[in-house]
Image: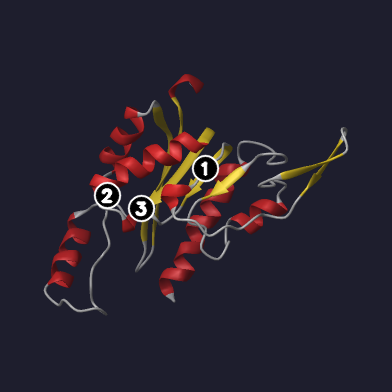
Amino acid sequence: MDIRHDHSKTVENVLKMLKGEGSLEGVSVCDAGCGTGSLVIPLAKEGAPKEQLQAGSENVVPVMPKFEVKDLESLDGKYDTVLCLDVLIHYPQSKADGMIARLASLAENRLLLSFAPKTFYYDLLKRVGELFPGPSRATRAYPHAEADGEWALKKVGWKIRKRGLITTQFYFARLVEAVPVQME
C-alpha cells in the first residue's frame, strides 16, 4: 500500500516535468508498462492523445487513450514522448541496456525513465532477502546505477537532460529525462 501511494509521487513529478515544457496538446505518448494508467489518464486529460483519428481531410478528433497488453519487447510505433516508470527494476542490467535502447528507438523527442537506484542500502536489502528464498520472498528486483543507464542512452545517441530522485520510507526512484543528442 505504501509503495503504491509513493509511486504516485513519481507520477506527479513526471506530470510536472512534462507540463513544464509547454502544452501537451497533440503530443503523442507511449506509457510503456503503464499498469493501471495512473499517468496516461491524466496525460490524456492534458490533451496528449495517444492516437488521433482523421475524420475527413481537415478535422482531427482526439481519441481516448488506447490501452494494449504487450510485452515491452514487442512495442512498436513512433511517439513524441516515451515513458517507462518503475519497470526497469524487473530487468537485470544486462537486459536493461537493450530495453533502454528499445524504448529510445520508439521516442522522437523525449524519454522518461524511473528505476530503483543502486545503492549500498538496496544491495544490502537484496542480499538479506536472498537468504530467505521461497516463492513469496523471492527478490527479483534489480536496482540500477545511474551511470549504467546513462551509458546505455549514450550508446544509442541520447543524453540525460533532467534528473530527479523520489524518496519515501519504502520507495526510492531515480527519474531521468533523456533527449536525443542532436536536440541540444
Q: Position of residue 135 (x, y in %)?
A: 24, 78
Contact (Cβ within 8 Å) of mark 2 with mark 3: yes
Nearer to us in this view, 176 or 135: 135
Q: Position of residue 70 (x, y in %)?
A: 49, 56
Nearer to us in this view, 10 or 86: 86
Q: Residue 182: which numbered mark, if any?
A: none
**Circle 2 sits in a helix, a strand or a loop, which is it?**
loop
**Circle 3 sits in a helix, a strand or a loop, which is it?**
helix
Point out the frontmost of discs 2 and 3. 3
- Label 2 Cα crowd, 10 Å radius (few <14 / some 14-19 / many 20+): many
Identity of the residue drawn at 26% across and 65% down: 140
Identity of the residue drawn at 49% across and 60% down: 9
> How many angstroms separate mark 2 from mark 1 (CA)?
25 Å
Residue pointed to by mark 2: 144
Q: Identity of the amino acid at label 3?
A: Leu
Residue pointed to by mark 1: 76
Point out the frontmost of discs 1 and 3. 1
**In the picture, residue 28 is in which quadrant?**
top right
Above or below for 83 versus 173 = above
Q: How is the image coloured?
A: secondary structure
Q: Position of residue 65 (x, y in %)?
A: 67, 54
Q: Residue 88: which numbered mark, if any?
A: 3
- Label 3 Cα crowd, 10 Å radius (few <14 / some 14-19 / many 20+): many
Q: Identity of the amino acid at label 2?
A: His
**Can residue 93 be spotted in the picture?**
yes
Disc on the earlier residue, 2 or 3: 3
Q: Where is residue 84 in the image (x, y as percent from the top left)?
A: 46, 50
Left/right placement of residue 90 relative to residue 51 reads left
In the picture, which quadrant includes the N terminus? bottom left
> How many angstroms separate mark 2 from mark 3 (CA)?
8 Å
**Circle 1 sits in a helix, a strand or a loop, which is it?**
loop
